Image (cartoon, grey):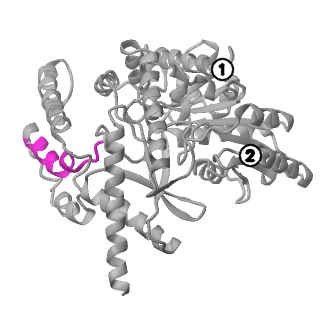
């Protein structure tokens, strides 16, 4: 079995095996006509259950043949131009190269003696990102597994900085359109069920600053402590960007930690044309960025940034066998001192390779392209009598719903839109997302692929309308 260990004696076997795997994936990418096969859980589960994990195949080619059947054939491929579903991006080749390198070397980004070089690369990328965000010379941060972990750590720091005598009085004020991880983080941090105060949004789905001011005033009047205000720069559903400068003013006035969840909107940091949409982010105490969304990186690649690096001490614990206290005085750069994780992948290498090959402007131009595409898509939807579109996009998300020409109940329209999404997914022709807006069912295009065209958008809209019309027609027949 030692022949399977990656080392000097097996370098050639490593090259052959990885090359064969890459060739299989490349063949799929080159020939897939659709983003999905439409396979159902009931159809695929027996095939995977039939694999006897206690009887190895002892052959890489055979294992890859099997992988074709249980994974590659039926995977959802985000690179396809008609994948318009969730916040999943196609990835850039330099980042995939970085992924291959980091997996093989297998550095662990907890202590310097496990990650020399890698530690400094991650720190350099954090400095680069905080500079792009304008957070100042004292800023710092750490890579994380994703936006949810970044938001959790940000609220942990906010809780500790609040220094509340009675933790049950702590409050987190967040947009009604903010990410669910805010509520989840509050629960994980042991805050009360009423700790998260939902702040209403305006017609563009941006946090209303008058409502935030009222909520902060209510906290003061009731003796509650506004531990944090969470603004969003790119909401999951609408891509809306909260009014960051005005929110920063209010957070400062009431002494609240300001966290900006820019997991989606962080691509604006590299945009040659839209960076101004993030004005005000430089006043945040912490910022979430997901490079694996709008920087076109493979999962996972995310970071938490903080304006005052000393606040990261709230995540610091020392162990003699790993990062003893004396290493701080010795100036040893141990990233575990900043992270909620111990063993951690060198995910920063993917972004490093991307910037060194493409440059920040190259990444920003790709993000600009999908934002431009969303603007064109909005024009098309707004002019199409079959659809009601919610807001003009700031980033690359379109939320809309099919409306039949003949009057029918809102409940029937809800069911028609739900059916259209499911039927489209089952066909494999395209993948779209769904959400609820003001109690009604809507569909969503999340446009993160610069290869997607307005013709793709038009074709998918026709497919949705066809499925919805078929559903309504069949139900009309049954009803009569």
| Residue of label 1 | 139
Element type where label 1 sits in the image: loop
Is 139 a magenta residue? no
Q: Position of residue 206 (x, y in %)?
A: 66, 44
From where the camera sits, is residue 48 visible? yes
Q: Position of residue 69 (x, y in %)?
A: 14, 50
Q: Position of residue 288 (x, y in %)?
A: 58, 34
Q: Is residue 39 left or right of residue 385?
A: left
Q: Position of residue 57 (x, y in %)?
A: 9, 46
Q: Residue furthest right?
A: 221
Q: Is residue 303 above or below residue 354?
A: below
- Mark 2 near mark 1, Cβ–Cβ under 8 Å? no
Q: Which residues are magenta?
A: 62-77
Please state, as top left, top right, bottom left or bottom right, where the N terminus lies in the image.
Answer: top left
Name the mark on residue 208: 2
Is 71 a magenta residue? yes
Q: State the predominant SS element of the stretch in magenta.
A: helix
Q: Residues within 10 Å of mark 1 (few under 14, many from 20)?
A: many
Q: Is residue 267 above or below residue 377?
A: above
Element type where label 2 sits in the image: loop
Task: Identify the image quadrant of residue 476.
Answer: bottom left
Q: Nearer the viewer, residue 4 or 309?
A: 309
Q: Residues within 10 Å of mark 2 (few under 14, many from 20)?
A: many
Give me the residue at 27% from left, 60% from top.
Answer: 426
Closer to the chain start, of discs 2 and 1, is: 1
Give me the residue at 92% from left, 52% from top.
Answer: 221
The residues bearing labels 2 and 1 have C-alpha atoms spaced at a distance of 28 Å
Q: Nearer the viewer, residue 443 or 135?
A: 443
């Amino acid at each position: 079995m030692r022949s399977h260990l990656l080392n000097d004696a097996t370098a050639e076997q490593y090259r052959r095996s990885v090359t064969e795997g890459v060739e299989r994936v490349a063949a799929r990418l080159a020939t897939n006509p659709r983003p999905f096969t439409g396979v159902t859980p009931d159809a695929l589960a027996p095939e995977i259950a039939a694999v006897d994990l206690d009887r190895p195949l002892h052959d890489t080619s055979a294992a890859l043949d099997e992988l074709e059947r249980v994974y590659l054939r039926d995977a959802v491929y985000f690179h396809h131009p008609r994948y318009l579903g969730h916040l999943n991006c196609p990835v850039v080749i330099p980042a995939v190269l970085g992924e291959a390198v980091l997996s093989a070397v297998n550095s662990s980004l907890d202590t310097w003696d496990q990650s020399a070089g890698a530690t400094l690369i991650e720190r350099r990328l954090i400095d680069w990102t905080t500079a792009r965000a304008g957070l100042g010379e004292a800023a710092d941060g750490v890579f994380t597994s994703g936006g949810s972990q970044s938001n959790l750590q940000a609220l942990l720091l906010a809780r500790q900085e609040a220094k509340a005598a009675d933790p049950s009085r702590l409050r987190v004020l967040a947009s009604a359109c903010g990410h669910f991880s805010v509520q989840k983080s509050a629960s994980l941090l042991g805050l009360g069920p009423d700790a998260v105060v939902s702040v209403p949004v305006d017609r563009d789905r941006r946090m209303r600053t008058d409502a935030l001011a009222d909520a902060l005033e209510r906290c003061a009047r009731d003796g509650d402590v506004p531990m944090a205000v969470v603004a969003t720069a790119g909401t999951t559903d609408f891509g809306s960007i909260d009014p960051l400068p005005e929110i920063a003013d209010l957070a400062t006035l009431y002494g609240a930690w300001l966290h900006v969840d820019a997991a989606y909107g962080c691509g604006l940091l590299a945009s040659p044309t839209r960076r101004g949409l993030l004005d005000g982010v430089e006043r945040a105490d912490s910022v979430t960025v997901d490079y694996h969304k709008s920087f076109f990186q493979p999962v996972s690649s995310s970071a938490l940034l903080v304006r005052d690096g000393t606040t990261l001490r709230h995540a610091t614990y020392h162990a003699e066998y790993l990062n003893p206290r004396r290493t701080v005085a010795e100036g040893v750069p141990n990233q575990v001192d900043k992270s909620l994780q111990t063993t951690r992948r060198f995910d920063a290498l993917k972004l490093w390779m991307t910037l060194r090959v493409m440059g920040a402007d190259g990444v920003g131009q790709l993000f600009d392209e999908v934002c431009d595409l969303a603007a064109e898509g909005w024009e098309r939807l707004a002019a199409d009598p079959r659809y009601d579109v919610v807001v003009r996009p700031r980033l690359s998300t379109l939320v809309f719903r099919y409306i039949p020409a003949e009057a029918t109940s809102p409940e029937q329209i809800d069911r028609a839109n739900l059916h259209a999404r499911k039927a489209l997914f089952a066909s494999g022709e395209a993948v779209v997302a769904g959400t609820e807006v003001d109690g009604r069912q809507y569909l969503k295009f999340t446009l993160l692929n610069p290869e997607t065209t307005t013709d793709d958008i038009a074709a998918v809209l026709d497919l949705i309308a066809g499925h919805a019309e078929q559903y309504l027609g069949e139900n009309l027949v049954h009803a009569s």
